C-alpha cells in the first residue's frame, strides 16, 4: 500500500514480522501447541493434519511436506489479490500411474489432474463454496513452461482439455489455467495422488456412506451393494474415480459422487474424536503430511495450523457444491464447453464472496447426469422428507410428464 513504512522491506523481513506475501497479516504464534488439525478438501476430498506439540514431532511432520513455489513460477501477471479475509484454494487429485499408482492403469506420458476443485472460504470463515471443474472441459490454456515455442514466445493452446495443464506444466500451469479461466487469484495450492488418498482414508478409519443402488466398476476396482458402508481407502478411491458404475458414464456424474464423498469425509473427521487418541492423531498427521504437495507458503505445520483455525467451524452443511456450468461439445460428445454467461455468474460470486446463484447452474449438463440420489447425505434417510425423497418425487413427476417410466 502506498505510504506504508514497510514498503521497502525484504520478503524475509516481512515474514519475520508475520506479514504474508499476499499482504495479509497473520497473528503471531502463541508458542508450543499440544495438537493441531486441519481439514482441507480435494477430489481426494480432504486432508487431515494432526500432531503433538513436541519439537521433534513438529519437525518430523514439517519435513514430510513437499512444497512448490507457485508465486515464483507465475510472477506478477496474475489476478488481483483481494485482502478481505477470504481464501481461495486449488485442490487437485493427481492421476499419475508411477510407483504405487501403477495398478490403476498404464502411464500415458505424465500425470494429469484427475480431479480439480476450487475451494472458496468466505470472509467470516463460516461458509465455503466448492467449484468442481470437469477434467474434460475445453479451455483456452495460457502458455506455460513446457509448451512449444515459436520464436521467443510460448504458444497457448486454444482448445485444450483442462487436465492437460498439469501434464504440460505441473502445479504452476494448473494454477495459471484456473486463474485465467476464473479471474480469481488462488491463495494456495494442494495436491494428493491416488496412493496418498488411500492411506489418508485408511488411517482415518474409513468413511461412512450410504448408496441407494449397487455400484460396480472393474476399471476403478469398485464393487458395492446398495446400503450403508464404511469405505476403506481402496473403496473410497474407487468411488471418486468411477465413471462407468453409475449414470451415463460421464465425468460430470463422477463429480457429483466426489462432492458427496467430500461432505461425508468432513462429517467423518468431525465425528471420530481424534484428540482423544494421540497415537491415531499422530499417525494421521504423519500420513497426511507425507501425502500432500502444497504451495511453498503452505508447506509447513505452522502454516497448516493457521488454516486449521480458519476451517474448524465449517461443517458439511456449510459447504455449497457447484459444478462449472458446461454443455457437451457438438464436435466431440466426450468433451464439454463452459457456458460463458453462467460461468461468469459463478466466478463473479466467488470474487465478491457471495453464494453461487442457482441460476448459474440451471440448464448445465452437470445438472443432468441422472445419478442424483445414488449416494445419500448423512441423515438423509427415505421417508424423512430429505433430499433423497425430494429427488425421487422430482424424478417421478418428470417420468409422469413423459408418459412412462424412464428407461434404465
Image (spheres, helix red, strand yellow):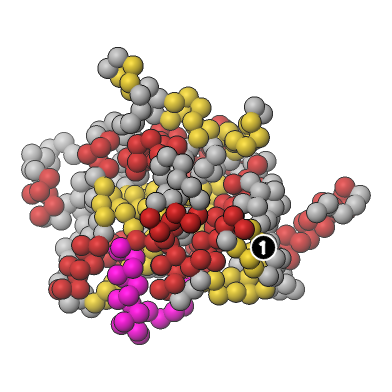
Tally the marks. 1
138 sits left or right of 169 in the view: right
Q: Magenta includes 91?
A: no
Of 282 and 313, the residue lying toward us: 282
402 versus 237 height, above or below? above
For image coordinates 8% across by 43% down, the residue present is: 9
214 sits left or right of 100 in the view: right
For image coordinates 34% across by 58% down, the residue present is: 292
Rendered location of residue 154, percent (x, y): 33, 23
Rendered location of residue 144, percent (x, y): 34, 31
Do we see residue 239 in this rendering? no
Residue 373, quarter of picture: bottom right
Residue 37, quarter of picture: bottom left
For image coordinates 16% across by 63% down, the residue present is: 28
Q: Quadrant of the C terminus?
A: bottom right
Circle 1 sits in a helix, a strand or a loop, which is it? strand
Chain part drawn in magenta = 268-290
Do we see residue 33 in this rendering? yes
Q: Magenta stretch: dominant SS?
A: helix
Rendered location of residue 262, percent (x, y): 50, 62
Residue 122, quarter of picture: bottom left
273 versus 17 height, above or below? below
Residue hosting label 1: 215
Q: Magenta includes 284?
A: yes
For image coordinates 41% across by 45% down, the residue present is: 111
Q: Residues within 10 Å of mark 1 (few under 14, many from 20)?
A: some
Q: Quadrant of the N terminus?
A: top left
333 sits left or right of 50 in the view: right
Of 110 and 121, the residue lying toward us: 110
State the residue lying farthest toward the right. Answer: 403
Rendered location of residue 298, percent (x, y): 26, 55
State the residue lying farthest toward the top. Answer: 151
Amino acid at each position: 500500500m502506498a505510504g506504508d513504512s514497510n514498503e521497502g522491506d525484504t520478503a524475509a523481513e516481512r515474514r519475520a514480522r508475520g506479514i504474508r506475501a499476499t499482504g495479509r497479516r497473520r497473528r503471531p504464534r502463541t508458542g508450543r501447541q499440544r495438537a493441531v488439525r486441519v481439514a482441507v478438501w480435494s477430489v481426494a476430498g480432504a486432508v487431515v493434519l494432526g500432531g503433538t506439540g513436541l519439537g521433534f514431532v513438529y519437525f518430523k511432520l514439517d519435513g514430510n511436506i513437499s512444497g512448490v513455489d507457485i508465486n515464483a513460477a507465475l510472477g506478477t501477471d496474475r489476478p488481483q489479490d483481494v485482502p478481505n479475509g477470504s481464501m481461495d484454494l486449488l485442490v487437485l487429485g493427481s492421476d499419475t500411474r508411477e510407483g504405487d499408482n501403477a495398478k490403476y492403469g498404464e502411464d500415458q506420458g505424465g500425470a494429469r489432474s484427475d480431479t480439480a476443485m476450487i475451494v472458496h472460504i468466505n470472509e467470516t470463515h463460516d461458509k465455503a463454496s466448492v467449484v468442481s471443474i470437469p477434467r474434460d472441459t475445453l479451455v483456452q490454456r495460457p502458455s506455460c513452461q513446457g509448451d512449444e515455442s515459436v520464436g521467443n514466445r510460448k504458444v497457448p493452446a486454444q482448445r485444450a482439455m483442462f487436465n492437460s495443464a498439469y501434464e504440460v506444466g505441473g502445479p504452476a500451469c494448473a494454477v495459471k489455467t484456473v486463474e485465467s479461466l476464473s479471474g480469481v487469484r488462488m491463495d494456495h495450492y494442494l495436491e494428493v495422488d491416488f496412493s496418498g488418498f488411500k492411506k489418508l482414508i485408511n488411517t482415518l478409519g474409513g468413511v461412512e456412506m450410504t448408496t441407494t443402488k449397487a455400484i460396480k466398476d472393474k476399471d476403478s476396482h469398485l464393487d458395492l451393494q446398495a446400503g450403508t458402508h464404511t469405505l476403506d481407502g481402496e473403496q473410497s478411491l474407487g468411488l471418486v474415480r468411477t465413471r462407468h458404475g453409475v449414470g451415463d458414464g460421464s465425468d460430470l456424474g463422477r463429480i457429483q459422487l466426489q462432492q458427496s464423498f467430500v461432505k461425508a469425509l468432513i462429517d467423518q473427521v468431525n465425528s471420530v474424536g481424534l484428540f482423544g487418541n494421540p497415537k491415531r492423531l499422530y499417525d494421521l498427521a504423519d500420513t497426511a503430511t507425507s501425502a500432500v504437495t502444497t504451495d511453498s507458503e503452505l508447506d509447513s505445520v505452522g502454516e497448516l495450523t493457521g488454516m486449521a483455525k480458519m476451517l474448524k467451524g465449517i461443517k458439511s452443511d456449510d459447504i455449497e457444491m457447484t459444478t462449472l456450468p458446461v454443455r457437451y461439445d457438438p464436435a466431440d460428445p466426450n468433451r464439454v464447453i463452459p457456458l460463458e454467461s453462467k460461468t461468469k455468474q459463478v466466478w463473479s460470486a466467488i470474487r465478491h464472496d457471495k453464494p453461487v446463484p442457482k441460476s448459474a447452474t440451471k440448464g448445465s449438463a452437470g445438472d443432468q447426469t441422472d445419478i442424483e440420489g445414488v449416494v445419500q447425505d448423512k441423515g438423509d434417510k427415505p421417508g424423512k422428507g430429505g433430499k433423497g425423497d425430494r429427488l425421487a418425487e422430482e424424478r417421478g413427476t418428470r417420468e409422469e410428464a413423459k408418459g412412462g417410466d424412464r428407461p434404465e
